[in-house]
Amino acid sequence: MSDLASKVIQDPVHGTIGIDGVFLDILERPEMQRLRSVRQLGLGCLVFPGANHTRFEHCLGTYHLAGRMAEAIGLSGNDSRAVRMAGLLHDVCHPPFSHALEAVMEGVTGMGHMDMARALIFGNVPYFRDEDSDLYGGMDTISEVMEADGISPEEVCGIISSPESTGVEALDRFWNKHEYFPSKDYSHQIIHGPVDADQMDYLMRDAHHTGVCHGRIDCDRLLKTMSVVNDRIVLSRGGITAAEGLMVSRSLMYTTVYFHETTRVAQRMITKAVETSDADLTDLHLLGDADLEARLIACGGRSSHEVRRVRARMLDKKALTIYSEQMDDGLAEVLMRYSGRRGSGMLERDIADAAGLDEMDVVAEVTSKENLQGKISIGKTDVSITDENGRIRSLARYSPIARSLQSRDPYGWAVVIACPKDRVEAVERASMKVLGL
């Protein structure tokens, strides 16, 4: 155990966060300390200059709120400790530049960041860099540290993984038939639910550091009205307004911050630089943002050029942007062929060919397939509400705001095409041709 039995950390969002025992031991390990060098919003700092906060801070905040949620629903002992540990470790394998390189890491390792988290916790992948063997050589794995303190690493990894009982059909059965769910599903919901510690922390933290005004959430009211029914977290009717506030905050933050057009262009530039480089990426889960930048620059060539452009904020300029309200059924059908990460690459190649340019000169971002299909998004807007008679219903049954948010497009745009500023006209013409406009 650490020489420091406990520590009090001052946090700009939650105030004082206390951490002790095995949680402090885990916090001081290399796997967690790496997160100090992974910015929470990736390249969002190029748009919001204050957004230099990190995954480390977010994991601390999630740990704190997970503990408060566990207390609110009456968890104690090992159940509470497992939930708090899951909150602390839930992002331990996030790659550099946050979500931008998740697909790259999955392509290299065959595992997403949650599966990688399990591998890291059990020591099935390296958990420190070779040059740090003099600092960490011989160190126990995270799973061994947890087990020595009576916390099940399997249970923690299970909580970190997304729960199976959050599908629309399963939720409908729960609301309308009171069907019983798998044991301890509420533990999953503390990390992955309509009202969860992860979401509450990142919304408040990201709003604080970006300076936007959409992230204010009434955590105290949500926690006060929270309980467990049939293994699921529900809110009483007194929590409806606070739940509506959370849903509105989430929707507006996605439009304003997470799907900001310029940020998405910068992320795609970095992603393409990584994908076209010959850099060794097998240890991507051990790198910070600056580490990866340095490795790509050392590779030379176009990858180095693109990374240095991003670092200097010499970003590609938008050649064509089609906003959601401008999209008709015909364009939606065309864009369906280009949805997803592979689809974006196909669109970039098609436009580059039509313009007579190199594929690296074109960046394309396409909205989600669900938006293109006009599907209602349920998921995070489906908070379960219990009334005075114990009946469970979706928040959407009570709230026209929640119903509206289910059909709201959080992107605001259908497609964004960008390129170096001296090629904008050529890429615009090629994009119009390829998309049939």
Image (cartoon, helix red, strand yellow):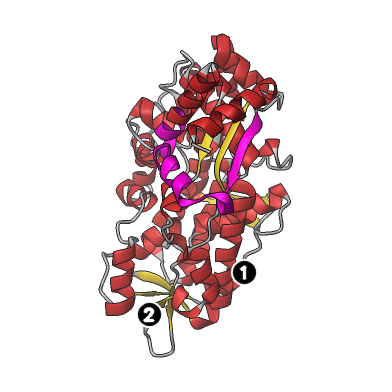
The x, y position of residue 204, in whole percent, is 63, 56
Q: Quadrant of residue 192?
A: bottom left
Q: Residue 117: x percent and y percent?
A: 39, 39
Packing grade of label 1 (10 A; few <14, some 14-19, many >=20) is: some
C-alpha span from label 2 to label 1: 22 Å
Which residue is drawn at the image coordinates 31% and 61% (left, top)?
A: 165
- In the image, residue 83 lies in the stretch drawn in magenta: no
Circle nearer the N terminus (2, 1): 1
Give the magenta-colored segment's residue range: 317-345
Q: Is the residue 340 above or below the residue 83 in the image?
A: above
Confirm whether the magenta stretch covers residue 333: yes
Q: Residue type at mark 1?
A: Asp
Instruction: Report the number of discs.
Output: 2
Residues at marks 2 and 1 touching, judged by CB atoms closer than 8 Å:
no
User: Can residue 380 be spotted in the picture?
Assistant: yes
Identify the mark at residue 392; answer none if there is no mark: 2
Residue 313 image point, x, y percent:
71, 27
Of labels 2 and 1, the one closer to you: 2
Q: Which mark is residue 218?
A: 1
Above or below: residue 250 compared with residue 236 = above
- Residue at image point 48% right, 68% down: 71
- Residue in view at x 42 percent, y 39 percent: 340
Per the image, label 2 sits on a secondary structure element best described as strand
